[in-house]
Image (tube, rainbow, N blue to C red):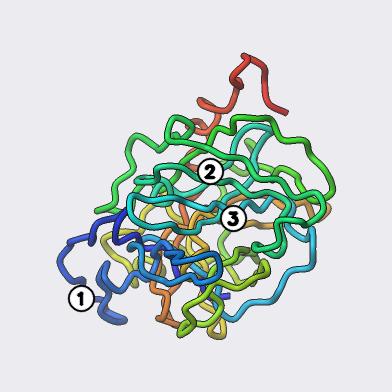
Amino acid sequence: MEFIFLVFTLILPCFALDPLDFQIGNFTLEDNDYRLTEIENDTDYIWDVGEAAGRIIGGTIATPNQFPYQAGILLRLPKKRAWCGGSIISVEYILTAAHCIDDALSATVILGAHNRENDNEEGRISIETTPEDFILHEYWSPKRLEADIALIHLKERITFSDQIQPILLPFSEYETQYFNNSLATVSGWGKHKSNCGKLPLHLRFYQSRIMHNSKCRRYYPQYVGLNHICLEPKEKRRSCDGDSGGPLVVNIEQGHPMLVGVTSFGKCCGGSYPTVFTRVTQYLNWITQYTYRGRDGSIPL
């Protein structure tokens, strides 16, 4: 699954930075391919909404309920609609990318879905949200692609089921780990063919190894820092339009999945370029600051 990150031409207006001359190749934000995937109608998704988005190219169709922590986010922008991913982290909060909701007028959070167009899937729920529910990191910068992380505070508490479960956040012993060379999984409904204009119906995923940041910086020298985590490109598989905001997960003891990244940016059609994610361990204090207590003062489970 190649991730082409949603690059919002609306949400992230034209990332007007100077072209970057790379040792490996030339990369500009115009090449970023992490764009919000515009939705012209209920079935036609056109990759054209920005420079910080993603899709999964060349991946595998997931089995139903394989990733119960996966959220789909249908965004309503000033002039268009778009699609992003997210992760369930508690009964009231979804973690996603800041560039996904930066300019959104409202968003429908879809949980328990496999076929994104089948509203009648058993156990599936949809929750409407508005900008008052959006919490963007205060240091989010579209120009530097920094702090690309955000929370959606749901208006109603989630009832967990076989189809809908939270993802484990890193705990103390993992806070200083880089996860270099760890096998990681990315999932989403992003485009699975770089020349395809429509998002796939079914949730897809792919796996690759987390690469060292020093290597990743060779591709994106002005953007990748300690707050990012990168995934090796693998056999024409990567994130692409529609995957933005979705989860990067590693398995820990006894195979439990743990969230380590949020899909942020990359070069969708550049098979040799790694996908870049926001590193979750760098933002645990920020996440806790907003999620520790819910609307009624209770501590989300």
**Counting residues from the N terminus, which is met first, the one under dot 2 or under dot 1?**
1
Amino acid type indicated by mark 3: Pro
Q: CA distance from mark 3 to mark 1?
A: 30 Å
- Local packing at callout 1 (Cα closer than 10 Å; few below 14, some 14-19, many 20+) is few
- Contact check, label 2 and label 1, Cβ < 8 Å: no
Q: Which residue is mark 2?
A: 281
Q: Which residue is mark 3?
A: 247
Q: Which residue is mark 1?
A: 21
Q: Name which quarter of the figure residue 61 lies in.
A: bottom right
- Local packing at callout 2 (Cα closer than 10 Å; few below 14, some 14-19, many 20+) is many
Q: CA distance from mark 3 to mark 2?
A: 13 Å
Q: Residue at x 45, y 58 (%)?
A: 82
Amino acid type indicated by mark 1: Asp
Q: x, y (%) of residue 121?
A: 78, 57
Q: Name which quarter of the figure residue 180 lies in.
A: bottom right
Disc number lying in front (3 or 1): 3
Toward the left, the furthest residue is 18
Count how many numbered circles sit on residues in the image: 3
Q: Is residue 219 left or right of residue 122?
A: left
Can you say whether 46 is above or below 250 in the image? below
Disc number lying in front (3 or 2): 3
Element class at badge 1: strand
Q: Residue at x 48, y 70 (%)?
A: 45
Q: CA distance from mark 2 to mark 1?
A: 30 Å
Element class at badge 3: strand
Amino acid type indicated by mark 2: Thr
Question: Which mark is on residue 291?
Answer: none
**Counting residues from the N terminus, which is met first, the one under dot 3 or under dot 2?**
3
- Local packing at callout 3 (Cα closer than 10 Å; few below 14, some 14-19, many 20+) is many
Q: Is residue 59 left or right of residue 136?
A: right
Toward the front, the furthest residue is 41
Q: Is residue 83 left or right of residue 227?
A: right
